[in-house]
Image (cartoon, helix red, strand yellow):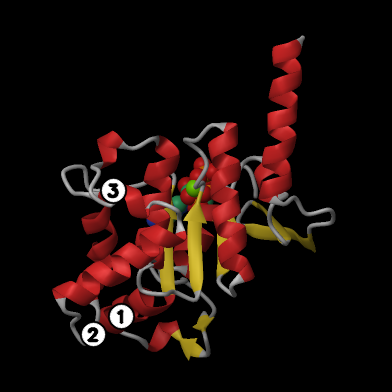
């Protein structure tokens, strides 16, 4: 977390090997990224990292399934069309959208589009998922559903690094890092972490109460 301009995206871009640090070293899984050329960096990125963005960044005239297949195009060694399809369907299944594989982005809700984007980020089985304001364009319920997907991935051993402006959303994480003026100010465990299932039940109860009143 941190104010606008505090360096959150810069940090994400560094972790994601999209930017190189101007000083210091960044080791990813023991590999000094400063020693790699562009192709080696791209390969490392493709194998270890998945990216999720605020604006989903799906290709419009491309089905959910084909969007999810995209990162496999760069896999080394190359993957057969059949295997690509199988992996993409599996990733869509993880985010609960196997039945929407042939829909286009404009036929999906914002939350569904973000889940397709998460499936795309997962398709190469990354170790780390990087999400810069993934709920910035989503309503409360849909944001909690996306947090549910992240929590379940995290339970399976995937590290999720997420930028958010919302305290509520940050409380779904295990750890909260606050930045200011390009520096880390605090880095602490989240006490009383929220769980998406409980938060959804609470939201439903609240809405029911409002409805009755
Ligand atoms: N490529 C760049 N070259 C030089 N300065 C940059 C570059 N990108 C960002 N900056 C500066 O670095 C600082 C941190 O920017 P960054 O985009 O990381 O902020 P942020 O915390 O993600 O903000 P926001 O919440 O608005 O997305 C800002 O002062 C910005 O102007
Ligand atoms: Mg930013």
User: Depth check: 5 or 131 in front?
Assistant: 131
CA distance for labels 3 and 1: 21 Å
Q: Is residue 167 above or below residue 85?
A: above
> Which element is circle 1 on?
helix
Q: Within 10 Å of the Cα at label 3, are there few (<14), some (14-19), or many (20+) other Cα atoms?
A: many
Alpha carbon separation for disc pair 2 and 3: 23 Å
Q: How many marks?
A: 3
Indicate left or right for 57 with 15 as reference.
Answer: left
- The residue that disc 2 covers is 76
- Upstream in sequence: badge 2 or badge 1: 1
**In the rendered image, which residue does mark 1 sit on?**
43
Residue 45 x %, y %: 37, 75
From the image, state whether disc 3 or disc 1 is nearer to you: 3
The quarter of the image holding the C terminus is top right
Residue extending furthest toward the top: 213
Q: Position of residue 108 (x, y in %)?
A: 33, 37
Q: Decide: few, some or many residues near mark 1? Use Cα within 10 Å; few <14, some 14-19, many ≥20.
A: some
Residue tagged 3: 58
> Residue at image x 39%, y 88%?
35
Residue 125 seen in this snapshot: yes
């Amino acid at each position: 977390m941190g104010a606008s301009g505090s360096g959150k995206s810069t940090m994400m871009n560094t972790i994601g090997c999209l930017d190189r640090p101007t000083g210091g070293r960044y080791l990813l899984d023991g590999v000094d990224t400063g020693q790699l050329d562009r192709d080696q960096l791209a390969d490392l990125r493709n194998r270890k990292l998945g990216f999720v963005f605020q604006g989903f960044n799906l290709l419009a005239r491309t089905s959910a399934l084909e969007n999810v297949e995209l990162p496999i195009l760069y896999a080394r060694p190359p993957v057969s069309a059949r295997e690509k399809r199988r992996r993409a369907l599996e990733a869509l299944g993880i985010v609960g959208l196997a039945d929407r594989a042939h829909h286009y982005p404009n036929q999906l809700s914002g939350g569904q589009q973000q889940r397709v984007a998460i499936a795309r980020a997962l398709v190469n089985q990354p170790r780390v998922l990087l999400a810069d304001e993934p709920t910035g364009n989503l309503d409360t319920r849909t944001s909690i559903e996306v947090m549910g997907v992240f929590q379940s991935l995290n339970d399976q051993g995937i590290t999720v690094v997420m930028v958010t402006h919302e305290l509520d959303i940050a409380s779904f994480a295990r750890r909260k890092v606050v930045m200011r003026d390009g520096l880390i100010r605090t880095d602490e465990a989240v006490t009383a972490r929220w769980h998406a299932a409980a938060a959804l039940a609470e939201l439903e109860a609240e809405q029911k109460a409002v409805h009755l009143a």
